[in-house]
Image (cartoon, rainbow, N blue to C red):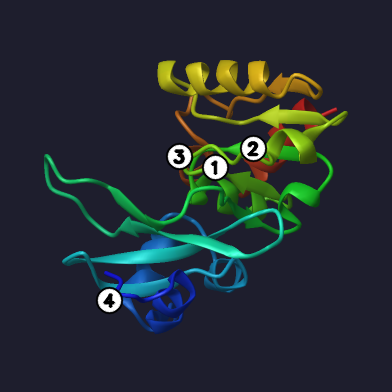
Amino acid sequence: MPRSGELPSERLARALPLAGTPGQAYVERRGIPLALAELAGLRFDPDWDGRPAVLVGLYDQENLLASVHGRYLSTLRGQNKMLTVGRPGGVAGVGNSWRAEPLILVEGIFDALSLAACGWAGVATIGRWAAWLPQVCNRRVVWLGFDANAPGDREALHYAEVLSTATPRRLLPPGRCKDWNTALVKRGNAAVTRWLQTNIT
């Protein structure tokens, strides 16, 4: 966890590179190549509030680090799967992030990484709202790739309402999978890539 007075940038820098850590095994188990995870800025922390986690920075519109998001490598019943510290207003981008065409919004960092593994840039909101998103989404087609369940549908509906000057479209993962990382692991890279090529027009 951050030390007293420690900035998010200092905390992220204090984490370890993924290679050779349990974080590498974790991301590869989820179908994400190490090189892609490193390119997205993922790092490993053996003690993120007491448990090992992979970390990623959440950045604002000016590409300034707003917060640090940690995804725990394992959880027991009743434990949180993730923990984010820092100020609001950041997202986790993979590839060209929100500058990419098409613009795809997803929920988790591993969903964005899964899209990137199939050749598509994405933005992970991490369940947080960034007030600048309507501005960067203005007059653009925005694909809402949130989870294929009731909470994901509610999130997509919320974004469709607040992105009133954009053209929102729902984008669901293939094969009745709950999310994009599940689809990547269960269906494989080639199948998810074909699905995206067919369904994004």
Cα separation, mark 1 vs mark 2, equals 7 Å
Quadrant (top left, top right, bottom left, bottom right) of the N terminus:
bottom left
- Do the residues under discs 1 and 4 have CB atoms within 8 angstroms? no
Marks 1/2 in contact by CB < 8 Å: the verdict is yes
- CA distance separating discs 4 and 3: 35 Å
Residue at (49%, 17%) from the top-left corner?
Answer: 154
Q: Earlier in the sequence, mark 1 or mark 4?
A: 4
Please tell me the numbered disc located at residue 34.
none
Instruction: Indicate left or right for 75 with 179 as reference.
Output: left
Tell me which numbered mark, 3 or 2, is placed earlier along the sequence: 2
Residue tagged 3: 182
Q: Height in image: 156 above or below 112? A: above
Name the residue beneath numbered marker 1.
Answer: 125
Dot 3 alpha-carbon crowd within 10 angstroms: few under 14, some 14 to 19, many 20 or more:
many
Q: Residue at x 76, y 26 (%)?
A: 199
Q: Which residue is mark 2?
A: 105
Contact between marks 3 and 2 (CB within 8 A): the answer is no
The crowding category of the residue bearing disc 1, from other C-alpha atoms within 10 Å (few below 14, some 14 to 19, many at least 20), is: many
- Return the disc, 4 or 3, that comes first in the chain's sequence: 4
Q: Secondary structure at mark 4?
A: loop
Which of the two labelled residues, at mark 1 and mark 2, occupies the earlier sequence position?
2
Amino acid on which the number 2 mark rests in the picture? Leu
* Residue picked out by circle 4: 3
Which label sits in the foreground, 1 or 4?
4
User: Marks 3 and 2, how far apart in space?
Assistant: 17 Å
Residue placed most toward the observer, 52 or 159:
159
